[in-house]
Image (cartoon, rainbow, N blue to C red):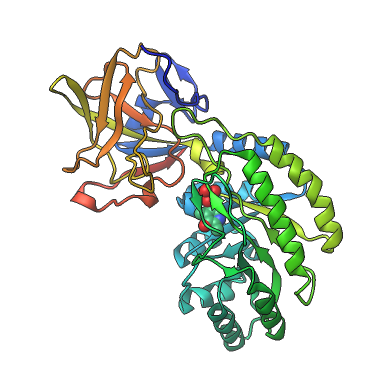
Amino acid sequence: MSSDKPIHAPQTHFPVHDGCLHIGGIALPRLAQRVGRTPFYAYERAALNARMGDLRAALPAGIRIHYSLKANPMPALVQHMSSLADGLDVASGGELKTALDTGMQTDRISFAGPGKSETELAQAIAAGAVVHLESLRDIDIVNRLGQSLGLRPAVMLRVNPDFELKSSGMKMGGGPRQFGVDAEQAPELLRRIAMRDLDWRGLHIFSGSQNLNAQAIAETQEKTFELAMRLADHAAQAPRLLNIGGGFGIPYFAGEKALDLQPIAATLARWLPRVQATLDGAEVALELGRYLVGEAGIYVARVVDRKVSRGQVFLVMDGGMHHHLAASGNLGQVIRKNYPVAIGNRMQEEKSEIASVVGPLCTPLDVLAERMELPAAQVGDLIVVFQSGAYGLSASPSAFLGHPQALEVLV
Ligand SMILES: *Cc1c(COP(=O)(O)O)cnc(C)c1O
């Protein structure tokens, strides 16, 4: 069929044998039998290992890599990531529990986010996790809780930078934000932290998410290092850790290309020695979510009906936007675009028709692929949505319309 349109980046994480996608070395129809029912998410250990291995090989030694649970909090997957990552970043009491259950050294678990409740803060302090202070209120409460618990809380200061991450899918720093304290206020807050009985570990500067422009990420990292070194002058002692954020994106849509790590690696290699020389050997950490897990997962649903409406083919599945809001285009997309989608048991058949892949919900929003070139699918076939290892089930409105929850497996 037509070839002049932009196409999806090739999905090469999982092999194809005898027409079937294999994940964890298991043919998809067999995996569906093993899971017992569709729809389900499947995440692959080998793909998680390979991604972390490639990343570590590309980046300078000494860069720490944290996993952000927000991207995928499935306990078995977090357990696996805890063996690959140098730290776990959480943003709720629930994620804190999942992270602690892995056995990760507790001061390598850090807890960020606005509006942390007193209960959550007390849990984090009692656990020995690192609390990211994001306001004056956080400083006061954490100090008071530390005194009442007889503990000296480990803390970082989260700073809302005075610059933005360009071409980012989701900006979370620069301008007015609910995250962190403005860079302009940071010197004053660092003085206050020094006056309290707090074990200050360092600075956290996160600018944004889902960026495929390596040059923009590298430039932001330079500005982040400059800001951190400027702010460090206002602290009572040198920071032990700089968490410089992440923002590494993955290609979801046609025309997008995988992130080129080379410019980022070169920037980090240039700055790391300088930062460590100036700041008494401070560690530098990246915090990544989707880049580590997004490509290692698929969503799988079964075709339950095949309809033709005024000449257009609709494949109706037993799963949809209630399990995978992002693929339906309703999680922050302005213009709806298709994720890479395939028929998992017809991987080698010619794409012979244009079909829309929809879910069972009684709303026109429940579309997982709109007018896509696909092999002719039949009832019982297994639809696969790639790039689904992050912001899938936990970021979806599972209760919407009362269908069964999707299952999740790690293979
Ligand atoms: C969401 C978030 C992340 C992870 O973002 P990804 O795009 O999944 O890498 C990391 N750090 C913070 C502070 C976040 O809020």
User: As drawn, is 113 to the left or to the right of 132?
Assistant: left
Q: Position of residue 267 (x, y in %)?
A: 75, 44
Which of the image's four quarters has the N terminus?
top left
Specify whether residue 108 is in view: yes
Q: Position of residue 396 (x, y in %)?
A: 34, 50
Q: Position of residue 376 (x, y in %)?
A: 27, 16
Viewer-closest of 128 and 190: 190
* Up/down of 17 relative to 195, above or below: above
User: Tag count in the figure?
Assistant: 0
Viewer-closest of 81 and 162: 162
Location of residue 291 by image quarter: top right
* Up/down of 182 relative to 294, above or below: below
Viewer-closest of 103 and 299: 299
User: As drawn, is 36 to the left or to the right of 229?
Assistant: left
Location of residue 269 by image quarter: top right
Question: Which residue is found at the position 31% from the left and 16% from the top?
Answer: 375
Residue extending furthest toward the right: 277
Q: Position of residue 344 (x, y in %)?
A: 37, 24
Question: Which residue is found at the position 53% from the left and 78% from the top?
Answer: 122
Residue extending furthest toward the left: 310
User: As drawn, is 116 to the left or to the right of 310?
Assistant: right
Question: Which residue is found at the position 83% from the left and 60% from the top?
Answer: 281
Specify whether residue 289 is in view: no
